[in-house]
C-alpha cells in the first residue's frame, strides 16, 4: 500500500493506483476528456493535469501512478487556466454545430465547455474539412468533429482486436481512419460500434434510420411489426433517467403502441427458438461420429463477421442457426402472417437492437430473405428508438406496462439472458441438458459462465456426459480460443472444447454499440443484474418449456432441424476478405 | 486486399527473417522495402503485414507518420526542392511553383509520362547554396527561376 495526499487529504491506496483513481477514492473530481475507464490511459488531451507539492512539474492524473509520499494538488487558479486553455484549443479545431449534432446534450466536450464556463473563442478556428465516411451500413465516421483523443483506435485494437482504425498521418492532419484511404466498409470493421460508444463527441455515430420507421408508421398500407432484443429493455431505461439496470419491458411495449406500431413482438421468443435449433444442432454434433466440434454460437453479427474475415477456417464450426432477430423476422413473415391472415408483403418488420452490426446482418446474405421478403426490414438501436420516443413526446417513465402480442411474444427467462455474456451458454445448457438426458436440470443457475472475465472456461456435467465449454466476451479475447481450436484442427487432434459462446462486446449485448452512452463495468454489471432478476421472475426459465415455442413446433415447424426449420431458421457462412479493395 | 502480388528480393526476405522477432522490426523492414522499391506501395505494406503478422492499419499508421516514407512511386527523376529555413527565405517556394507550372505537377505528384516527380524537402545540408534543389541526386545551388527550364532540359 502507498500513502499519498490529495489536496491535503491523506489516503492509502494500492500500488499502481493512478492519481485519478486515488482522487476518486477521496471524492475529488479531476476533469478528464480522453480518459475512459475501459481503456489504458492514453494521456492525449491534458485536461487532467495536476500539480505536485515540492515539485514544479505538472503531472497527468490519468496516467501517473502514485508513489509513497506523493502530495497532489488537483485544483487551483493556475490549473483552472491551464485546463481552460486546453479546452479552448480543442474547441478551436471543433465545429460549432452543437445544435444539429447527434450528440447534442450528450457530449463530453460540450459538458466540459459548459462546466468551465467557456464563453469566448480566443483561438482562430481551424476545423478540418474532411467529409464524413458514410460507406458502412452501421457506422458514420465524421473526422471533422474528431478531437483526436484516440479512444476509437484503442477500442478497435485493444478491446476488439479488429484493427480497422489507426492514427493515420501526423500532427494537425491526423485522422482516425482505416488504412490506405479506404472506406470503413472496405476495412476489416465488424460494425460492433464500440468506437461509437467510446467516442466522447459526435465524430463516430450510428447510421440514424429513425426516419424510416416514421415513414412506415405513416404508411396506411403497412403493418408495422416491431421486435425488441433482450438488452434493449434494460438499456432504454437509462435514456429516460430511470435507475441503471431497470427492466422496462412493459413500458417499451406501451411506448411502441403509442407511436403507432401495429404489432409488438419480442426477440426473446426468437431467442427461445434459437436455443431449440442451436441446442439441437449441438446435440446432433455431439452424437454424430465425425461432426465438426466445437460449435460456436452465431447470434452475434460482430463475431460472425470477425470469424468470416479472420478465421474463415472456423466457419464450419459456427452454428448454422440464425440469430434470434433473424429467426423472429422470418417467422413474423411466415408463421405469424399465416396464423393472422396478414399478407407478408404488407408487413414491415422492425428490430430494436443494442447493436450497430445488426443493421448489416439483415442484408448479410440471401438466407436473410427466407420468407421470400426481407425477413427484417429495419434495425434501430436503443439510442435511436429513445430519440424517436423523445421526439414524439413519450413520457417513458410514466407509462403503464403493457403486454406483448401473441403468438410470437411469449418468452422464458432463458431468452432474456441472451443479452449478457454467458447468457446464451446458460440458456443452451438448460435445454441441452433436457435434450441429452431426457431429464430436467434442477438448478437452472449456471453461475460458472457468468461475470465479466474475457474468457470463461468450464465443464458442464449432464449425467455423465461432460460438455467442455468456453465463453468469450470482448473480441480481442477470442483470438486465444480460436488459435487453440485451429491448432487442434490443423494437427488432427481432438477439439479442446465442445461449445463456445462468443459475444463481440465486453459484457455482451447489454453493452453493445447501440446502447446508451456512459457504459463502464459498473453499468455493465447493473444491466446484467437487471436481466437476471427478470429471468428469476419468469414463469418459465427453459426455452423448451415455453408453451408458444411448443405450439410453433407442433403447428408449423414440426421439430427442431426439420426441413422447414432449416429453410427459415438456418444460414450459411462464407470467407470474407479483411479488405474489400 | 488488392490482388496484385509483390515479389520481395531474396535479400529482403532474409532481412525480414532476421528481424522477425526483434523489437523495432517494423521500421527497419519498411526502410529496407523503401530502399528496394523507392517507395512503399500498398501491396508491399500488405506483404510486410503478412510476413510480420502486424495488422495492415498499424503499418499504414507508421508509414503516414514518418515523412521519410513515400507511398507513391517516384518518377525516373525525383526533384527535391529544399524548403528549409535558408532556402525558404531565399525563395524556395517560387522554385517549387515554377517547376510545378512547367511540368504541370503538384508537390507529391508525378508527371503523366512517369519521368519527373516533385517533392518539397527539409534542409539538405548546404544552406550556403540556398535556394537548393536536387534532381536524381545531382545538386543545383543558388537556383533562379530563369535557370529552371535549362536544368530540366538536361534530364528530358
Image (cartoon, grey):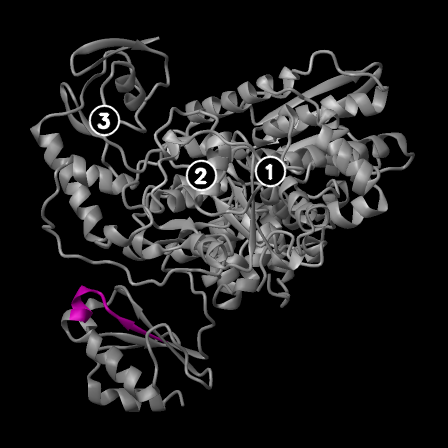
A252 left or right of A345 in image:
left
* Marks 1 and 3 close (CB-CB < 8 Å): no
Residue at 84% from the left image edge and 23% from the top image edge? A436
Q: Earlier in the sequence, mark 1 or mark 3?
A: 3
Q: Is residue B85 magenta?
A: yes
Q: Earlier in the sequence, mark 1 or mark 2?
A: 2
Locate residue A550 relative to residue A422 in the image: left or right.
right
Percent of width and height locating residue A565: 79, 44
| Disc 2: CA contacts within 10 A as few (<14), some (14-19) or many (>=20) | many
Whether callout 2 and callout 3 share a subunit is answered yes
Quadrant in which the N terminus of chain A is drawn: top left
Report the span colored magenta.
B79-88
Q: Look at the numbered disc 2 and give the secondary structure of its residue.
A: helix
Residue A290 position in % (x across, y down): 90, 37
Disc 1 to disc 3, C-alpha distance:
49 Å
The residue that label 2 is drawn on is: A255
Q: Is residue A37 visible?
A: yes
Amino acid at each position: 500500500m502507498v500513502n499519498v495526499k490529495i489536496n491535503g487529504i491523506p489516503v492509502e491506496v494500492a500500488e499502481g493506483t493512478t492519481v485519478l483513481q486515488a482522487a476518486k477514492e477521496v471524492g475529488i473530481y479531476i476533469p478528464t476528456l480522453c480518459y475512459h475507464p475501459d481503456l489504458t490511459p492514453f494521456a492525449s488531451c491534458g485536461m487532467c493535469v495536476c500539480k505536485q507539492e515540492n515539485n514544479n512539474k505538472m503531472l497527468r492524473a490519468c496516467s501517473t501512478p502514485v508513489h509513497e509520499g506523493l502530495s497532489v494538488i488537483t485544483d487551483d487558479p493556475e490549473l483552472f487556466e491551464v485546463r481552460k486553455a486546453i479546452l479552448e484549443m480543442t474547441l478551436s479545431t471543433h465545429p460549432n454545430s452543437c445544435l444539429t449534432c447527434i450528440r447534442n446534450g450528450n457530449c463530453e466536450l460540450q459538458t466540459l465547455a459548459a462546466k468551465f464556463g467557456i464563453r469566448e473563442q480566443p483561438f482562430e478556428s481551424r476545423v478540418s474539412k474532411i467529409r464524413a465516411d458514410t460507406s458502412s451500413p452501421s457506422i458514420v465516421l465524421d473526422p471533422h468533429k474528431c478531437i483526436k483523443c484516440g479512444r476509437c483506435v484503442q477500442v478497435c485494437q485493444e478491446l476488439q482486436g479488429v484493427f480497422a482504425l489507426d492514427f493515420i498521418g501526423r500532427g494537425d492532419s491526423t485522422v482516425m481512419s482505416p488504412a490506405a484511404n479506404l472506406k470503413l466498409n472496405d476495412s476489416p470493421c465488424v460494425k460492433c460500434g464500440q468506437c461509437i460508444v467510446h467516442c466522447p463527441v459526435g465524430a463516430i455515430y450510428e447510421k440514424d434510420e429513425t426516419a424510416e420507421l416514421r415513414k412506415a408508421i405513416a404508411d396506411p398500407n403497412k403493418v408495422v411489426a416491431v421486435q425488441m432484443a433482450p438488452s434493449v429493455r434494460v438499456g432504454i431505461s437509462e435514456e429516460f433517467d430511470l435507475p441503471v439496470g431497470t427492466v422496462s419491458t412493459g413500458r417499451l411495449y406501451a411506448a411502441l403502441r403509442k407511436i403507432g406500431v401495429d404489432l409488438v413482438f419480442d426477440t426473446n421468443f426468437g431467442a427461445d427458438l434459437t436455443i431449440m435449433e442451436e441446442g439441437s444442432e449441438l446435440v446432433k454434433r455431439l452424437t454424430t461420429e465425425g461432426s465438426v466440434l466445437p460449435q460456436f454460437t452465431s447470434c452475434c453479427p460482430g463475431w460472425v463477421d470477425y470469424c468470416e474475415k479472420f478465421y474463415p477456417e472456423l466457419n464450419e464450426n459456427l452454428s448454422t442457426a440464425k440469430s434470434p432477430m433473424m429467426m423472429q423476422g422470418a417467422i413474423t413473415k411466415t408463421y405469424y402472417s399465416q396464423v393472422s391472415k396478414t399478407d407478408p408483403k404488407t408487413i414491415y418488420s422492425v428490430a430494436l437492437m443494442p447493436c450497430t452490426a445488426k443493421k448489416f446482418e439483415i442484408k448479410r446474405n440471401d438466407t436473410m430473405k427466407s420468407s421470400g421478403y426481407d425477413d427484417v426490414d429495419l434495425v434501430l438501436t436503443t439510442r435511436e428508438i429513445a430519440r424517436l420516443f423523445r421526439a414524439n413526446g413519450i413520457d417513458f417513465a410514466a407509462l403503464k406496462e403493457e403486454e406483448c402480442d401473441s403468438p410470437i411474444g411469449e418468452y422464458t427467462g432463458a431468452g432474456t439472458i441472451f443479452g449478457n455474456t454467458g447468457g446464451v451458454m446458460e440458456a443452451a445448457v438448460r435445454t441441452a441438458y433436457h435434450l441429452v438426458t431426457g431429464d430436467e436440470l434442477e438448478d437452472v443457475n449456471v453461475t460458472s459462465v457468468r461475470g465479466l472475465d474475457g474468457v470463461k472456461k468450464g465443464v458442464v456435467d449432464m449425467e455423465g456426459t461432460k460438455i467442455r465449454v468456453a465463453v468469450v466476451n470482448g473480441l480481442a479475447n477470442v483470438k486465444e480460443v480460436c488459435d487453440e481450436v485451429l491448432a487442434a484442427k490443423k494437427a488432427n487432434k481432438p477439439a479442446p472444447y465442445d461449445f463456445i459462446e462468443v459475444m463481440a462486446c465486453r459484457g455482451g449485448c447489454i453493452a453493445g454499440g447501440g446502447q446508451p452512452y456512459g457504459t463502464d463495468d459498473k453499468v455493465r454489471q447493473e444491466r446484467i443484474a437487471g436481466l437476471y432478476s427478470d429471468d428469476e421472475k419468469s414463469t418459465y426459465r427453459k426455452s423448451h418449456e415455453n408453451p408458444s415455442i411448443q405450439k410453433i413446433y407442433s403447428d408449423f415447424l414440426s421439430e427442431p432441424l426439420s426441413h422447414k426449420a432449416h429453410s427459415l431458421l438456418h444460414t450459411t457462412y462464407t470467407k470474407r476478405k479483411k479488405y474489400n479493395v | 486486399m488488392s490482388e496484385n502480388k509483390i515479389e520481395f528480393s531474396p535479400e529482403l526476405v532474409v532481412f525480414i527473417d532476421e528481424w522477425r522477432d526483434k523489437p523495432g522490426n517494423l521500421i527497419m523492414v519498411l526502410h529496407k522495402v523503401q530502399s528496394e522499391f523507392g517507395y512503399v506501395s500498398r501491396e508491399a505494406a500488405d506483404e510486410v503485414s503478412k510476413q510480420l503478422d502486424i495488422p495492415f492499419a498499424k503499418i499504414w499508421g507508421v508509414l503516414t507518420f514518418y515523412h521519410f516514407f513515400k507511398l507513391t512511386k517516384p518518377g525516373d527523376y525525383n526533384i527535391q526542392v529544399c524548403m528549409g529555413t535558408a532556402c525558404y527565405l531565399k525563395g524556395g517556394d517560387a522554385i517549387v511553383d515554377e517547376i510545378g507550372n512547367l511540368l504541370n505537377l503538384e508537390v507529391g505528384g508525378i508527371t503523366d509520362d512517369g519521368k519527373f516527380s516533385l517533392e518539397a524537402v527539409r534542409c539538405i545540408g548546404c544552406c550556403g547554396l540556398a535556394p537548393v534543389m536536387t534532381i536524381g541526386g545531382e545538386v543545383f545551388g543558388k537556383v533562379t527561376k530563369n535557370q529552371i527550364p535549362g536544368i530540366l532540359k538536361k534530364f528530358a
